[in-house]
């Protein structure tokens, strides 16, 4: 599926600063770092002063089914601007706007109707969730922990060794993987490669060195266990 363009008033960013997108010799997918766009996205979300919105951004950023995310301020409709102020994800199954129903401002029937029309006209599906889904543990804490290592440096030979090891065995505990590629402390590297979209794990379970990871491209773990409604 081709990548769709976001409107000018949507701040576009890949789901992580190191989100992979094209296949290379290691079997992973790599993208250039869109640092300026990522900072713009972070600034937009921080300005909303919503911890739930911040955590939602992190969780979507780590989901292998999400290609890119943006924070959309508004959409044009018949010459007017319809307020949106939601995270929009470009997923494998299309573009989705996430409406956190217990954190959003009040909308009357007319405002809600205009919003739905504007989203539909832009090919964006609306998913309503509440903060209890975003805040569910251990998923929320696991995602924050993984996200802290998004800038952890991982040498290219280590990346190649990890991808190659998982290509042979498909699923492996982080501890076992670390031993195979010669890492004394494998957790930072595993977290960094999850952020880059190279490997995946189920974050709805306790995260430790016994956690199982797989090559994200294999879709052995098709998502990170994030139960957002579809």
Image: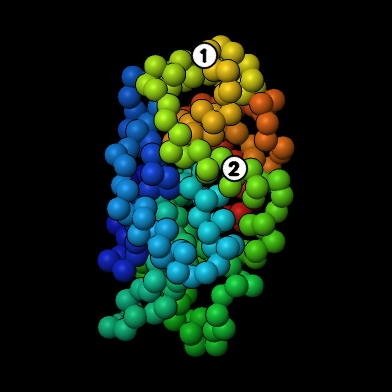
Which quadrant, please, contains the N terminus?
A: top left
Q: Is residue 172 above or below residue 98?
A: above
Q: Nearer the viewer, residue 52 or 166?
A: 52
- Left or right? Give the position of 134 relative to 26: right
Q: Secondary structure at mark 1?
A: helix
Q: Residues within 10 Å of mark 1 (few under 14, many from 20)?
A: some
Q: Secondary structure at mark 2?
A: helix
- Left or right? Give the position of 48 relative to 131: left
Marks 1 & 2, CB-CB < 8 Å contact: no
Residue 120: x, y in percent?
A: 42, 69
Q: Nearer the viewer, residue 121 or 143?
A: 143
Residue 6: x, y in percent?
A: 32, 60
- Residue 145 tag number: 2
Residue marked by disc 1: 181
Residue 202: x, y in percent?
A: 64, 37
- Left or right? Give the position of 1 relative to 190: left
Q: Is residue 13 above or below residue 167?
A: below
Q: Nearer the viewer, residue 180 or 7?
A: 180
Q: How many marks?
A: 2
Q: Is residue 141 above or below residue 200?
A: below
Which quadrant, please, contains the C terminus?
A: bottom right
Q: Residues within 10 Å of mark 2 (few under 14, many from 20)?
A: some
- Residue 160 tag number: none
* Residue drawn 58% across the image and 63% down it: 51
* Residue drawn 36% across the image and 55% down it: 39
Is residue 100 among what the camera can see? yes
* Residue drawn 72% across the image and 37% down it: 206
Closer to the chain start, of discs 1 and 2, is: 2
State the separation of the CA atoms marked 1 and 2.
Answer: 22 Å
Q: Is residue 38 above or below residue 63?
A: below
């Amino acid at each position: 599926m081709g990548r769709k363009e976001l409107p000018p008033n949507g701040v576009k960013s890949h789901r992580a600063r190191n989100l992979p997108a094209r296949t290379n010799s290691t079997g992973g997918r790599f993208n250039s770092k869109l640092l300026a766009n990522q900072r713009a996205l972070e600034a937009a979300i921080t300005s909303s002063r919503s911890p739930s919105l911040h955590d939602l951004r992190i969780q979507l950023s780590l989901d292998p089914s999400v290609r890119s995310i943006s924070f959309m301020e508004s959409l044009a409709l018949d010459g007017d601007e319809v307020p949106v102020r939601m995270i929009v994800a470009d997923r494998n199954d299309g573009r989705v706007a996430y409406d956190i129903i217990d954190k959003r401002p009040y909308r009357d029937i007319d405002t809600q109707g205009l919003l739905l029309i504007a989203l539909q006209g832009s090919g964006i599906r609306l998913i309503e969730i509440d903060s209890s889904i975003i805040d569910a543990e251990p998923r929320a804490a696991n995602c924050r922990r993984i996200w802290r290592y998004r800038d952890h440096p991982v040498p290219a030979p280590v990346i190649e060794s990890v991808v190659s090891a998982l290509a042979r065995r498909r699923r492996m505990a982080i501890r076992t993987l670390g031993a195979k590629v010669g890492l004394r402390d494998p957790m930072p590297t595993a977290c960094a490669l999850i952020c880059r979209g190279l490997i995946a794990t189920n974050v709805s379970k306790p995260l430790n060195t016994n956690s199982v990871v797989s090559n994200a491209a294999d879709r052995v773990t098709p998502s990170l266990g994030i139960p957002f409604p579809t």
